[in-house]
Amino acid sequence: MNIWTVSNQKGGVGKTTTVVSLGGLLAQQGRRVLLIDLDPQGSMTSYFRLDPDASERSLYSLFEACANNSRIEFLDTLLHTTGVEGLSLLPASTAMATLDRQLGTRDGMGLVIKQTLARLESQFDYVLMDCPPMLGILMVNALAACQQLLIPVQTEFLALKGLDRMLHTLQMIAHSRGGLFPYTIIPTFFDRRTRASLDALRAMRDQHGEHLWPRVIPVDTQFREASKAGKPLSVYNSSARGNEAYASLLRSLQREYLPLAEAASQ
């Protein structure tokens, strides 16, 4: 099982789009893919036409059971279909916003996702997690479980501050894990017609070149249309330039990191 976490400590940078786009492409490869929505706002949950305000079977149920030391017999009931073959969803609930207050100081709550994925290992080839933009129990769970971190960064200067905070968090998590895990910075919302995009991309290349994906995810209105349809862009319009960019990103990730993951598992 390959576990990828998509995270940035700034909202609106393309995290959900990245998870859904890569998940759709992986499903088209014939992979069994699980998408996990860890953001209480539930953007990815809403993307697939589920209501994070009304979902009775969500990630919150999992944390609630762990907090009560209950054996989780209902895990499969939390997994929802997305309408795309091979693509499943573990949805969010807005109640997850209370987890830091309820469970933030309890031992073991940072490993709920990691322990859950161990039980699902035979069911999925890939797990992609969509994180909230703030550091808390949900992001800690995602980083504790992940093997590869993807950091979408909008190509404008305010987004670079979120990147700096994310990298600081990554260093803290790496210290507790005993080492840094691989991460890739993904420039998003790139518009070559604007000076802001060009300058921000240049700054990323100067400051983070070693971990920066050399291409960009462009601005593309087809992402919005695919979201309205509740489908990954690869399903909605495979010829869209945004989909072609994510397909290139996926090829890069599979070429660069999968051999390392496979070697580590042997």
Image: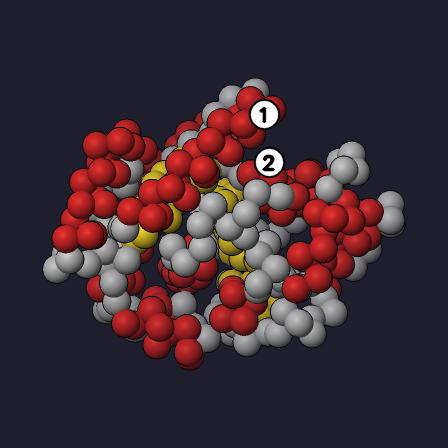
- Picture residue at 87% right of the left edge, 45% below the top: 69
From mark 1 to mark 2, how far is it between C-alphas? 8 Å
Q: Is residue 150 left or right of residue 138?
A: left
- Work out which quarter of the rendered image holds the N terminus and state it: top right
Percent x, y for residue 117? Answer: 64, 45
* Badge 1 or badge 2: first in the primary sequence: 2
* 42 relative to 179, above or below: below
- Picture residue at 73% right of the left edge, 42% below the top: 104
Percent x, y for residue 90? Answer: 62, 60
Q: Are marks 1 and 2 in contact (CB under 8 Å)?
A: yes
Percent x, y for residue 51? Answer: 62, 74
212, 158: nearer the viewer: 158
Residue type, numbered disc 2: Ala
Residue type, numbered disc 1: Arg
Residue 249 visible? The answer is no
The numbered mark at residue 177 is 1
Residue 73 visible? The answer is yes
246, 266: nearer the viewer: 246
- Picture residue at 67% right of the left edge, 57% below the top: 97
Q: Secondary structure at mark 1?
A: helix
Residue bearing mark 2: 144
Q: Count the marks.
A: 2
